[in-house]
Image (tube, grey):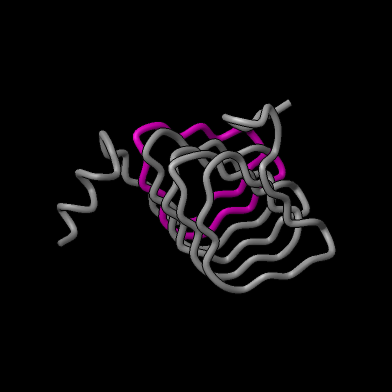
Amino acid sequence: MIKGKDTGGIDAFLGKNTTFQGTLIFDGLVRIDGNFEGNIKTEDTLVIAGSGNVKAEIDAGDVKISGRFDGTIVAKSKVELYKPAFVTGTVITPVLKIEEGVVFNGNCRMAEDSVSYKSEEE
């Protein structure tokens, strides 16, 4: 079981039959089982569950995906992709874990940290 930093569990949850568009900024652990489109910013952990469908620009500490994702991920710590994830886009992270059975179509840049990558872009 994945546990949030402060509460011992999930700090926020976007359920399977929900849709949200906009900007999500949070501390702790957030799990998305529904549909999300927009921007996500956190120093902590984002989980996109198997039923999750996310189209976003993500700036996070850790990202764990087993659902569908399209966009850009900049992770300070790591990105983990679990079957049956379908990921399209760009991933920038110091650590990338891809489980067998995951579909990843895109680009990956293994930067020591996302801060150095961002300063190279500017």
The residue segment tinted magenta is 83-105
Q: Nearer the viewer, residue 94 or 38?
A: 38
Q: Please tell me which residue is depicted at 23% across the width and 53% down the height of the picture.
A: 118
Q: Residue furthest right?
A: 17
Q: Nearer the viewer, residue 104 or 51?
A: 51
Question: Nearest the camera: 81 or 101?
Answer: 81
Residue at 40% from the left image edge and 31% from the top image edge: 95
Compared to 55, does 116 lie above or below? above
Residue 53: in magenta span: no
Task: Name the residue located 63 percent from the left edge and 46 percent from the top edge.
Answer: 30
Q: Is residue 102 magenta?
A: yes
Where residue 74 sits in the image (x, y, percent)?
A: 39, 49
- Residue appearing at x 72%, y 46% in the figure: 49
Query: Furthest residue to the bottom?
Result: 21
Classify residue 115 by image quadrant: top left
Q: How many marks?
A: 0
In the rendering, at what x and y percent does residue 84 appear? 71, 44
The quarter of the image holding the C terminus is: bottom left
Instruction: Locate residue 122 relative to residue 38 in the image: left or right.
Output: left
Would you place residue 98 above or below residue 59 in this image?
above
Quadrant for the N terminus in the image: top right
* Residue located farthest toward the front when viewing the structure as drawn: 7
Q: Residue 13's x, y, as percent?
A: 73, 50
Quarter where residue 78 is shown = top left
Depth check: 69 or 44 in front? 44
Q: Is residue 81 above or below residue 90?
A: above
